[in-house]
Amino acid sequence: MPVFPRLAALVSRTFMRLQQPRAPLLACILVPLAFGLFSLALGQDRNWDLLNYHLYNPYALLKGRIGTDLAPAQMQSYFNPLLDIPYWLMTQYWPAPLAGFAMGVLHGLAFVLVFGIARRVLVPAGAGQEQTRRGSAVALLLALAGCLGPGYLSELGNTMGDNATALLILAGLSVLLHGWERLGSAHAAWALAAAAGVLVGAATGLKLTNAIYAVALCAAMLSLPLRWPRRLGLAWVFGLGVLAGIALTAGYWFALMWSNFANPLFPQFNAFFHNTLAAPISVADTRWLPRSAMEAVMFPFVIVADAKRVGEVPTRPFVWPLLYALVCCWTVRAGWRAWRGKPSGAASADLPPLAPQARLVLAFVAAAFLTWLALFSIYRYCVAMELLAPLAVWLVVQRLLPARAAGRTGAIALAMVALAALTGMKTWGHESWARQAFRITLPDVPLDTNTTVFLTGGAVAQGWLATQFPAAVTFAALNSNFPEGPAYVGRVQAMLAERPGQAYALLPANVNWRAQSVARMNDSLAGIGVSANGSLCKMLGSALGRLRVHAQLAAPQPGGEGATCTLAPLPQDLSDLAAEDRAEVALQSPGLLRYGLVLQAEGCRTYDAFIGADARPYQLCPVKLGHLAGSSAALGA
């Protein structure tokens, strides 16, 4: 049998199985578990934000360190840590792989929510059994396609928060859809709008960038099939619910920031609150925004053409140019029908009318994308709308083509988009598992209430190291991304004056990654017992060059009968780590002078630290109080 007929037969059998009555329940159980296993396969999360603040912030809150430490996680030290507390607790009490599995399962619940939304949109009330089964099967496939988007996959199992908070956003939309028949009832409608607002507001309080979805769903509610006064009223109640949700998840944090810094969003928007520790800034990362009106119009294509246009991790989200092109065709078709005197929303002989539930979803996705485009244009904030994008594609295709052709066209297009996302999948970083997610070797020096440790520079995320030291030690960041104000240097010197013990600077230590890779390969060879004198070892040696592996067979040891096959780094991969560490010390020393600190290079020592099985050593160098470098004006004092 030729390949394509066999593939078509397989797809047909799969679709028939998905129409079985138990298929939705089984899928909603098995798919999140599968994502948990996928998270396990990816390995220990090590994204930069995790190492910078997703561990430090919950630690600081639970240990009562707010206002004691000084920005160890740089500016992000003062972001709401509520979302990070569960992961922090899991790393303290669970084996790291179990925590990673749990995060994957949590993120996999997005499949359940998208399925519920798609099924509610595709299966009208009062539908027959056959239509319900077919609609449910299509909804399962659309939910799976949504969970194969590049933004969602890049954060699967990690702590960046977009996958987790997307659950609350999808739940807010789901509340409106599943309570659809009650939107005509005054009391029930107000309650539904408020509940949806609380859910989306809770997501916004946990991560403020989710404000785009609060704006989008509020705007989408204006498309409800109700009289305009009722639409505006429900949108207003939704907005009040958003404020309540923000207060629920972030109100405590705003109060804590106000009590410590007289700025509820410290150090953001300090131009309005004027805390002298921080510069008078607002917050606007404009690097990713469209650079012209034409680029904004063509942005769905721009972000596919340039994989790094909307984030540090290469991303090519093909679903957006596909959806954009379909919407443009739909708009042209609607304009043509209007010109010919036919209502744009009316049914034709072969196309059904657009259901109001579908209109709400499309309006939400469109408003979210446009708001995101205007405010951020950072792709990882797109996860919630990316999960719904395949459903939006399906709905628009149904408005352009007859049902049979629309089903085939939509399925092929979405399958190609999902395949492209899988083959080009990138993540924010993972390492091999160890039982303990994070661990360090502590120096054999007094580490108590008299000790201050300064984290220097900001390129290497170091906030996680502060969580591994005794809680009595005080930490502060120097020369980081924190927008230092005129009182910052004085605060650093006051910390030293309050703690008469030895102060230290914590610096990154260098690692030879290729030598580490060779060491891991040697562990594997020893584990399976490959003999140095065996044919397998010789075959491996001859294959190393062809495979461009940065390793070579180690020289045989005299009298090494029965020795294990051992690899060694290539000569060009060898490095003097001690010299590189000294260079790092020399690089960081001048920056400490502006705080009145002198780094004593001769006292620097290197200690082990690990993220999963990955070595991340650090240097600890004693510092002493000297004279401030530069004039007081230069320091902002």
Image: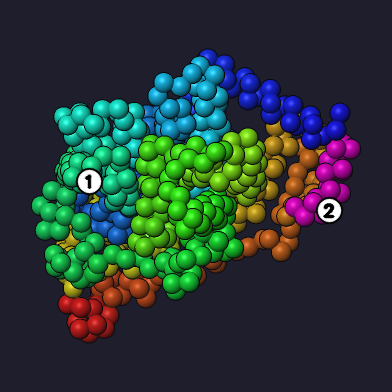
Report which residue position mark 2 lands on: 546
Residue closer to the observer: 113 or 514: 113
Q: Position of residue 195 (x, y in %)?
A: 23, 34
Which numbered circle lies on residue 228?
Answer: 1
**What quarter of the picture does the C terminus occupy?**
bottom left
Q: Is residue 521 visible?
A: yes
Q: Is residue 56 visible?
A: no
Task: Name which residue type carries label 1.
Answer: Trp
In the rendered structure, does residue 535 fall within the stretch colored magenta? Answer: yes
Q: Residue at x 47, y 58 (%)?
A: 339
Q: Gap between marks 1 and 2, in whole Å?
A: 70 Å
Q: Position of residue 587 (x, y in %)?
A: 44, 72
Task: Name which residue type carries label 2.
Answer: Arg
Instruction: Judge from the rendering whether residue 350 lies leftward or rightward of residue 310; answer left or right.
Output: right
Residue closer to the observer: 99 or 202: 202
Q: Which residues are magenta?
A: 533-549
Q: Quadrant of residue 223?
A: top left
In the rendered structure, does residue 100 fall within the stretch colored magenta? Answer: no
